[in-house]
Image (tube, rainbow, N blue to C red):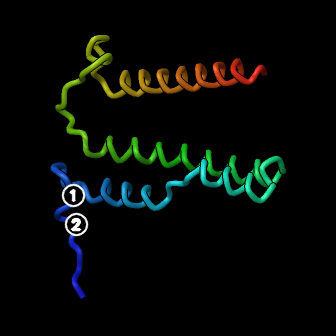
Amino acid sequence: MAVLGTRSFIGTAANHTALILVFGMAAAVTSIPVISRIMHDVGLLGTRFARIVLSVAVIEDIVVYVVLAVAVGLVVSSGSKAFGLPAALNIHGVAESSLYHTIVAVSFLGVALTMGALSTGG
């Protein structure tokens, strides 16, 4: 039996923790559209059970994206330069960067929820 080493997957940062997080995350990814379609096909989509299952799937996906952010943070070198909008706004520190990304994510969520409510008439 051949053993598959991690050397070909480890990347330039050689961070085993990040590799483990990404592989664990890949195993945890859900497919909300597939779950929704199955619930629809069996006639359960409008039930409390379906709302609970889909809510848990969404929460789990959010946690998976947080784990992805941690994994990416582990492999970013401390001397790497900012680029894009953070560089244009002169955001270079870890605290400033964290605040910027939190504000952008919350703003995006707010816009998405507002636009979703407007498109459904709610």
Structural crowding at the residue carrying mark 2, measured as other residues with C-alpha within 10 Å and reported as few (<14), some (14–19) or many (≥20): few
Amino acid residing under circle 2: Thr
Single out the residue that lies furthest toward the bottom: 1
Amino acid type of the residue that numbered disc 1 sits on in the rendered structure: Ile
* Residue 6 percent location from the top left of the image: 22, 66
Q: Is residue 43 left or right of residue 65?
A: right
Q: Mark 1 = which residue?
A: 10
Circle 1 SS class: loop
Check if mark 1's residue and mark 2's residue have beta carbons within 8 Å.
yes
Give the quadrant of residue 122. top right
Question: Which residue is outermost to the top?
Answer: 89
Please tell me which residue lies in front, 3 or 98.
Answer: 3
**Image height of 2 relative to 69, above or below:** below
**Residue designated by label 2:** 6
In the picture provided, is 45 more to the left or to the right than 22? right
Crowd rating for badge 1 (residues with CA inside 10 Å; few <14, some 14–19, many 20+): some
Q: Please identify the quadrant where the N terminus is shown.
A: bottom left
77 and 2: which is toward the camera: 2
* Residue sitting at x 54%, y 47%: 61
The residue drawn where x is 26% and y is 16% is 87
Percent from the top left, x then y, of residue 30?
A: 55, 54
Asked if residue 3 is positioned above or below residue 88 in the image, the reply reads below
Q: CA distance from mark 1 to mark 2?
A: 6 Å
